[in-house]
Amino acid sequence: MARITRKHFLTSGAAGIAASRMPGANAGQSTGRPKNVLFLLSDQHKPRALGLFGDPYARTPNLDVLARSGLCFEQAYCSNPVCTPSRASILTGLYTHNHRAYSNGTPWPFEIKTVAHHFSRAGYMSALIGKMHFVDAQTHGFDYRLDFNDWSQYLGPKTKLYADELSRPNSGSGLPQIDDLWRDYGDPWAGVRENDGRKGAVHIGRSSKIPERDHFESFVARETIRFLKNHSKKQPFFCISSYLKPHDPFMPAGRFARMFSPESIELPATFGKVDLANIPKEIRRRIESAGSTPELGDPAMAKLRLAMYYGNLAQMDDCVGQVLRALQEMDLEKDTIVLYSADHGEMGGEHGLWQKFVFYEPSVGVPLLLRVPGMTRPGERCAVPVSLVQLLPTLLELCGLPAPSGLDGSSLVPLVREPSRKVDATVYAEFALRSRNAKYMIRRGDWKYCFYVNDMPELYHLRDDPQEMRNLALLPERRGRAEEMKAQLFAWRMPPEL
């Protein structure tokens, strides 16, 4: 894979500034200045958990308005269904095996440059406000950064309320933000947290004791608005506003926790219905094991978990709405590309599974909404399968900036211009690389094939079986299709774990 040299980087940046000043370089721009980018990012958002998709429990009025004002990609996928590797792909345009942030405990290699480097070199002010799960102290090219550590300073003594909610060290939820900070001397909250009676590491869910204005999402929204007020008129900006919710802890602020009655929640149709003999052993263990929340074997507790998940989602949507209204009030909408997505999905009880880590649609799928002034038309939808690894080249092209060589993702701009165009798209994903549980996925047309290095393969026809309940991989009549998909997957990435 081609690497980006400092010379190439500086040249690209200068070319980008020149391109942004050329007439017509920024399609649809009304003021002649380079387009801004506001990237709204959440964590663990189930792809169909939006009001616009008819989810009966999703209270997402602000994201629905964003979707109705622009383009909705209906079949978007992350490149790796876990936080750090997925976010690294979003920011670098590379798959996990190329950016080498293999897991939630792996630092991003310094030499792999991010979207922030590209925009900063082109004269933009790059900002990251909220979660990114960098694992170490590198800034990865951002000029302006506020994260969990800044939120903890804001909370002061109230940080203990959050330590109680988490119950254990968890860098994915920001306490500590960087594991190494506590590695030498241990968890400073040990023996101080109040035990709430949970049976595993993750609480089923309850109303938070933290005041709503002090939640991480409120902090991120407020600081994003402050950034826009202080910096949006000085130079073009690339700003990521990144929220933890709906990720655990499943403890929304009171008014959101009260939105949903667990008794009114229906469990997914696949809950408890999976043929355990016809799926990989790894998936069977996940369904049968207690995991991080043993209580979820009880349907009543599973309903409570879903109620609090949707409460988290509603709270995140409310905070996103605050930022979008501020963008409008500051008269920035006509100059700003707005993008919303998540790092991965959430199984939410589908197949009897929770969290992410698997290649079923609720886990590896993500919502993806895009509004480009002068280009996207209200209410458009695109059914072509796309990947978050394509976001970096897409944003660069939309802003008239050159993409570096060696990216794995291709630009989505042709689909942004013509969402209904026919494209023979192929999407890949991978998980747990360099381990005995490594697995890989390919989605092509209506077919999805999953290869497990030490386990049974999976093959699903998503149009006929959208819930992925009939594994066709071992059927004699589908063996040819399975081998064909496997060959294409191996042509993309031959598993080195074999």
Image (cartoon, rainbow, N blue to C red):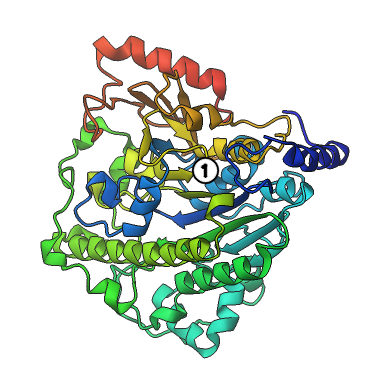
Say which quarter of the image contains residue 405. top right
**Residue for point 34% across, 72% down:** 251
Vertical order, 327 against 354 (above or below): below
Left or right of 317 in this view: 406: right
Q: Is residue 94 left or right of residue 211?
A: right
Residue 342: x and y, percent?
45, 50
Quadrant assignment, res 401 = top right
The percent position of residue 226, horizontal first and vertical second, equals 59, 72
Return the residue found at the far bottom. Answer: 157
Tag 1 residue: 372
> Where 115 sits versus 171, above or below?
above
Residue at the spot x=58%, y=42% of the render? 89
Q: Position of residue 103 (x, y in %)?
A: 56, 49
Q: Secondary structure at mark 1?
A: loop
Picture residue at 68% right of the left edge, 63% below the top:
233
In the image, is 473 to the left or to the right of 392? left
Please determine whether, in this image, residue 448 is positioned above or below residue 47: above
Q: Looking at the picture, tell me which residue is in the foreground, 389 or 434.
A: 389
Farthest-out residue, left: 263
Decide which of 93, 422 is in the foreground and name it: 422
Q: Is residue 259 visible?
A: yes
Q: Quadrant of residue 129?
A: bottom right
Residue 5 point in image, percent of width and height: 84, 37
Label 1 is placed on what type of residue? Val
Viewport quadrant of the N terminus:
top right
Q: How many marks?
A: 1
Residue 178 showing in the rendered view: no
